[in-house]
Amino acid sequence: MMFRLMLTTALAVLPLAATAQEITVGAANMAPYLDPGRDHSNVGSQFYYNSFDTLIDRDHTKLEPEWVPALATSWELISPTVMELKLRDGVKFHNGDPMTADDVIFSLNRMMQATFPPYVVRAKDRLANFPEAEKVDESTIRIHANREEPLWETLISLQQVMIIPEAYTKALTGDPDVAEDSDFEAFALAPVGTGPYKIESFQPGEKLVWTRFDDFWGEKAPLERVNVVQIAETASRVTALKTGEADIVTNIAPDQLSLIDNDPALKTAGSATALFHVMIMNQNHPKLEDPRIRQAMSLAIDRDALNEALWLGKAIVPSTHTMAEMGELHQPDLVTFEYDPERAKALLAEAGYDGFEITYDTAPSYYTNGVLAAQAIMEMWAAVGINGKIVVGDKWTGNSPDLMARNWSNPMYFADPFGSFGVMWAPDGPSQSEGRFNTDEAYAKTWDRFRYSTDVAVRKAAYAELMERVKADPAVLPLYRPFESWGMKTAINWAPMPGHIPYVLDFRAGSISLAGS
């Protein structure tokens, strides 16, 4: 009865069946706000590429970065710390305003010189090397770096530096000549970009509607309308797909794929996404300060068994915090994380572990298979003598001094180890700022060589040193790259592209087509 009630409630907000150029997406989660500058979440990352543009884009059909013009038609380094970009003519925002050099400078400096607290965090963990952007003339801008930058195009193509309209944003609240925090809060509920789809309506946490933007500067959008509706329960999403109430559904676990693939009107597409589900451990919890206990917590987990049981072997279990998308910096030869239950038992004995309870926090549905993985980990811990307990709740506990362990994710925000491990585990980065991870001068010096060297060999060697530090004093264990799948009608030609960050719903020209349209 409860399932039927939940399903009825979810489907009640869905529109009628799709037309030839209209689709409905049943999404596991819907963002509480839409602002590409502040957003850092797996949920939010789905929703920006259709409506916003960066200055530099990449060919998302390819794993290796191939940079292509977007709102900038060309770019060049005029010194090791200054890049000059030429802006595209004739670009319009969704509200009809023409895009100007002033809009671009406003968009970049709102992040590079951030004062709005959410922007300050994103600027710190991604854009700290960029003090400012400046206008040269109406078609030319320059971006300045503090130090020689090995990742110019990569960082200028980030979601966080997508371009937004200055006058529109400043006029949302208060003084129309001043960018106020309240303007950015209002923008997140009424966002405007330059992409092929404008956001017609947005109900935070519930529904998003995109419609084709006829004044888009590039190839027009293939769809007239896209309705994205949150359907939290996997079974409800599958039912919505089977009944025709949804045309695409997100986040389908492997054990549900046959329910879709066995239906001749339906199909699935999936991949091991460029993201790690991880276990994090609080180095500063009084009972976990001895690194041998945290080593044992990690060594006790048979990640290959988790992959087979939860992902039917389709996930990728890493030997270190690396993935093929990192290109030249991919280092699968490093062995930072492994399964060794006998070593775990020995370390617990050496540390004098007396059986005290170790809590493991998880959200009820945010991560596909998150609770099932937690249950399996408890059994693996018990096998080596660890007394574990699962705590399920929607509240984020990664910043709590009472945290002992929990699940989390480390997405690849951009194709470099700095874009995954780096964003999360930098000196003074999110993990340290939340009080559960410690760095010191030696770590910072190694980090500096990894982050800023323009010699790939030096960067790789420094990253290997960082991984050794993580192995000796662990605060994170990458469990696996989850195999995430999307279900859809057979008439829809769409699949996630290898060059995108995780979960992006790319419905631009060339990315999706409908039979008969």
Image: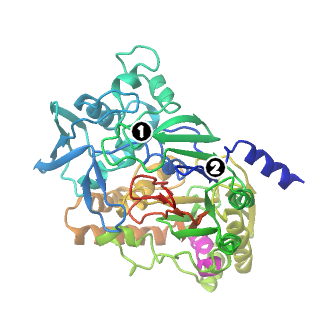
Q: Which of the two residues, 347 or 103, is positioned nearer the viewer here?
A: 103
The amino acid on which the numbered mark 1 sits, given as a three-letter code, is Phe
Magenta stretch: includes residue 6: no
Residue 482 visible in the picture = no
Magenta stretch: includes residue 304: yes
Q: Is 351 displayed left or right of 382 in the figure?
A: left
Quarter of the figure that contains the N terminus: bottom right
Disc with the residue nearer the chain's start (1 vs 2): 1
Q: Which of the two residues, 324 or 239, is positioned nearer the viewer here?
A: 239
Report which residue position mark 2 lands on: 397
Q: Quadrant of residue 360?
A: bottom right
Furthest toward the front, the residue is: 516
Q: Residues within 10 Å of mark 2 (few under 14, many from 20)?
A: some
Q: Quadrant of residue 466?
A: bottom left
Report which residue position mark 1 lands on: 213
Residue displayed at 71% across by 71% down: 259
Q: Which residues are magenta?
A: 292-307
Q: Height in image: 431 above or below 111?
A: below
Q: Quadrant of residue 100?
A: top left
Q: Which of the two residues, 288 or 72, is positioned nearer the viewer here?
A: 72
The amino acid on which the numbered mark 2 sits, given as a three-letter code, is Thr
Q: Secondary structure at mark 1?
A: loop
Q: Height in image: 359 above or below 73?
A: below
Q: Position of residue 463 (x, y in %)?
A: 34, 68
Furthest toward the top, the residue is: 175
Q: Is 89 displayed left or right of 515 in the figure?
A: left
